[in-house]
Image (cartoon, helix red, strand yellow):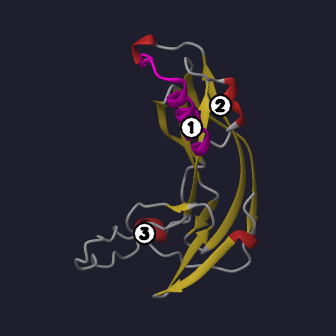
Amino acid sequence: MVTQNDVMFKHNTGFDEMRINECSSSGDIGNPQLPVKVLSFVLPYNFTVTGVVINSIVQEKLSENFYIFPAQPPRRLDGSEEPPFVEPNSAIYGSSAPYPNKTVEIINDVYTHGYHVVTVAIYPVVYHPANREIYLRDISFTINYNNSFDSRLSIPFEKQSLSRAELGKQFVKSMVKNMGDVENLS
């Protein structure tokens, strides 16, 4: 669970920039820039992902009010001029609807090094822009899958040496949250 101790704020040109360790930032330009946690999981190889189910959400409101910094265009690393500041999207910042309107979503479903890896984006923060309230969320979810695999999507296994297979296994272990399952699914 994300707690208030995990959250850091920095004041930036009249806005509050929010950071949480081990999270990246949402990136819809002009919309509130909020933390997003991206996690990958290894799943059985010949199974099809059918979706994500939210099991529970526990929210905790932060006691202060915040004016969240709007996401900006990426900066080029070649030393060229910084893109102009993008003002907050008035449709979002003036709304009483919570932002973002998603909790967990599948962002990638791939086969790599002989393993089936699914990546999800988890949104541990929800912002109510009109009243500037922030809620931290502890989200429990399940990735659903079944064994009705479409063999046309299968990637044929290539022959590989034991050392190459071990390197692939170590790579997949380094990228997934459920690294103990890599042994069982190889």
When the figure is inspected, residue 48 is found, relative to residue 51, above or below; the finding is above
Mark found first going from the N terminus, 2 or 3: 3
Quickly name the residue at label 1.
172
Q: Amino acid at mark 1?
A: Val
Most foreground residue, 127 or 5: 5
- Asked whether disc 2 touches disc 1, contact meaning CB atoms under 8 Å apart, the reply is yes
Quarter of the image with the C terminus in it: top right
Q: Amino acid at mark 3?
A: Ala
Based on the picture, tell me whether residue 156 belongs to the magenta stretch. Answer: yes
Mark found first going from the N terminus, 1 or 3: 3
Q: CA distance from mark 2 to mark 3?
A: 36 Å
- Asked whether disc 1 touches disc 3, contact meaning CB atoms under 8 Å apart, the reply is no
Q: Local crowd at mark 2 within 10 Å, few (<14), some, or many (≥20)? A: some
Q: Main secondary structure of the magenta part?
A: helix
Q: Amino acid at mark 2?
A: Val
Q: CA distance from mark 2 to mark 1?
A: 7 Å
Percent position (x, y) of residue 155?
42, 19
Taking the image as shown, residue 76 lies to the left or right of residue 124, namely left
Percent position (x, y) of residue 98?
58, 60
Quickly name the residue at label 3.
71
Describe the element under mark 1 as helix, strand or loop: helix
Based on the picture, tell me whether residue 69 belongs to the magenta stretch. Answer: no
Chain part drawn in magenta: 155-175
Quickly name the residue at label 2.
182
